[in-house]
Amino acid sequence: MKNPTPGKNPFELESYRDRMPLHVRELYDDMTRNYAKLQGRAGLGRFWRFWAFAVCYLALLMVISDTTTDTILVFVGLVLCGWLYIAVPSFTISVRRLHDDGKPVFWAVLPQVAIFYLLAEFTLGLPPNWIVWGILGAITAVAFGFMSLPGIPLDDAYGEEPKED
């Protein structure tokens, strides 16, 4: 295979970053470069693209883990590692989105708690606790409602207004 970027490893995704479509590059940056960045702001489109990826990733991970593993310990380990892989970037993009809305960062924690509870209940094979699911679902819906509001159109203490596409 001919190296498209001489001097770089052709098997590293970073060497192809400049040729990625914009939305894929933003997702790649949120997962690799900005995964722990709590400063700044994130636009509404970037936030929802990331969360759509996160939900698809977790669903695919659970299906693959369920069909390929024979023991519950391996299944729980795969799902837990997969959730930990996506938890920090999804929390940080939620924090940056709340910075854009001017809302308290507390609301970024609630979807993570709901996802953790859902995954824990699913992986342990417990029967669904509909009361807890209802409460967590309502709180998560309110949190995502706050994150779905349009951002403050001016530059603020968290940075300049994100460019929407």
Image: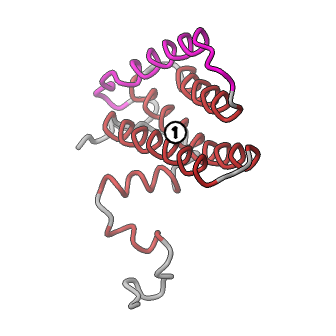
Is residue 133 in the magenta section?
A: yes
In which quarter of the view is residue 113 placed?
top right
Is residue 30 in the magenta section?
A: no
Q: Position of residue 137 (x, y in %)?
A: 50, 17
Q: Position of residue 46 (x, y in %)?
A: 35, 41
Q: Position of residue 161 (x, y in %)?
A: 33, 36
Image vertical order of residue 93 relative to residue 12, above or below = above
Q: Residue at x 50, y 52 (%)?
A: 31
The residue wearing badge 1 is 90
* 75 to the left or right of 10: right
Image vertical order of residue 35 relative to residue 153, above or below = below
Tell me the SS state at disc 1: helix
* 42 to the left or right of 110: left
Q: Which residues make up the magenta segment? A: 126-155
Residue type at tag 1: Ser
Q: Nearer the viewer, residue 53 or 41?
A: 53
Predominant SS along the magenta part: helix
Q: Position of residue 42 (x, y in %)?
A: 40, 37
Q: Residue at x 54, y 48 (%)?
A: 61
Disc 1 residue crowd, few under 14, some 14–19, many 20+, Cα 10 Å: many
Image vertical order of residue 29 relative to residue 75, above or below = below
Q: Residue furthest bottom?
A: 2
* 31 to the left or right of 53: right
Q: Residue at x 56, y 44 (%)?
A: 62
* 67 to the left or right of 44: right
Image vertical order of residue 38 relative to residue 99, above or below = below
In which quarter of the view is residue 84 placed?
top right
In which quadrant will I find the N terminus?
bottom left
Q: Residue furthest right?
A: 73
